[in-house]
Amino acid sequence: MEASDAAEHIVEANEGEGHEGDNKFRSRTALVIAFMAMLLAITSLGGGNVGEDIMTNNIQASDTWAFYQAKSIRQTSNRLVAETLESELLLHQSSITPEARQAIQQRIDKLKETAERYESEPDKNEPNNPLKGEGRTQLMARAKDFEAQRDRAQTQDPNFDFSEALFQIAIVLASVAILAMSRLVFKVSLVVGALAFLLMLNGYFLFLKLPF
């Protein structure tokens, strides 16, 4: 139910004549409807943001893992080439000139250095930040961080879904309470609304994980 719907209920609640006690009940219920409509809007906003977080972090994690795999392939390739050159150097050491041996050794050292850099390459501006950098170590940490944020958002999501549904039910019950002048239905609406409010808070702060 939108805030505009709640406004209509407020208008309807104030229309017509009735006993003073009934009018107070209608006014009080109308205010509760407006308040729950506001909480419903806040819940919808939280649910929308969480949905975006799930999608964004999932894409970021996937892209980072792909970069990690590409870096691993390049690292393995460099190490294999270095090992091959070392084997060739040992096999033909008697027939290779000192100059050629030196050049091959420099090539081997360069390949090993590059392979080591692929393993850990911290960001120059933030060398102590494990999430910044282009090495495999940093990429793995960053990918896991994206996954952790995605998992947290997935844990938050059902709280907002259930909260939205319960707020809508509570608003409908409060509307019925106005029409039927039923204080019992109004109390049920308050209970449902309170449960929805707790779920909304849990969606934002994750005090506990839902068992379902």
Image: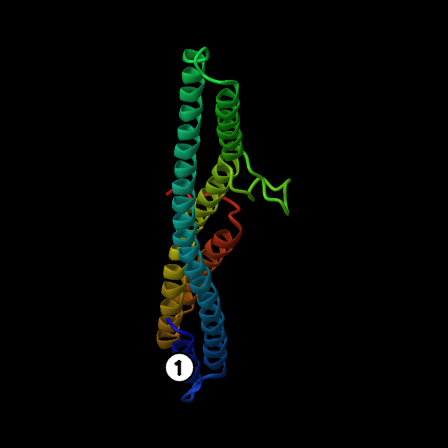
The quadrant of the rendering that contains the C terminus is: top left
Residue visible at 39% across and 48% down?
58
| Residue 112 at x, y percent in the picture | 50, 27
Left or right, 123 with respect to 17, comes to right
Point out the residue furthest to the bottom here: 16
Residue visible at 53% across and 51% down?
205
Q: Image height check: is 5 above or below 75?
A: below
| Residue 53 at x, y percent in the picture | 44, 54
Q: Which one is in front, 101 or 1?
A: 101
Q: Quadrant of residue 2?
A: bottom left
Name the amino acid, label 1: Glu
| Residue 73 at x, y percent in the picture | 39, 33
Disc 1 on helix, strand or loop?
A: helix
Q: Quadrant of residue 50?
A: bottom left
Q: Can you see residue 181?
A: yes
Label 1, on which residue? 8
Q: Which one is in front, 66 or 20?
A: 66
Q: Can you see residue 211?
A: no
Q: Quadrant of residue 151?
A: top left
Q: Image height check: is 198 above or below 15?
A: above
Q: Which one is in front, 187 or 201?
A: 201
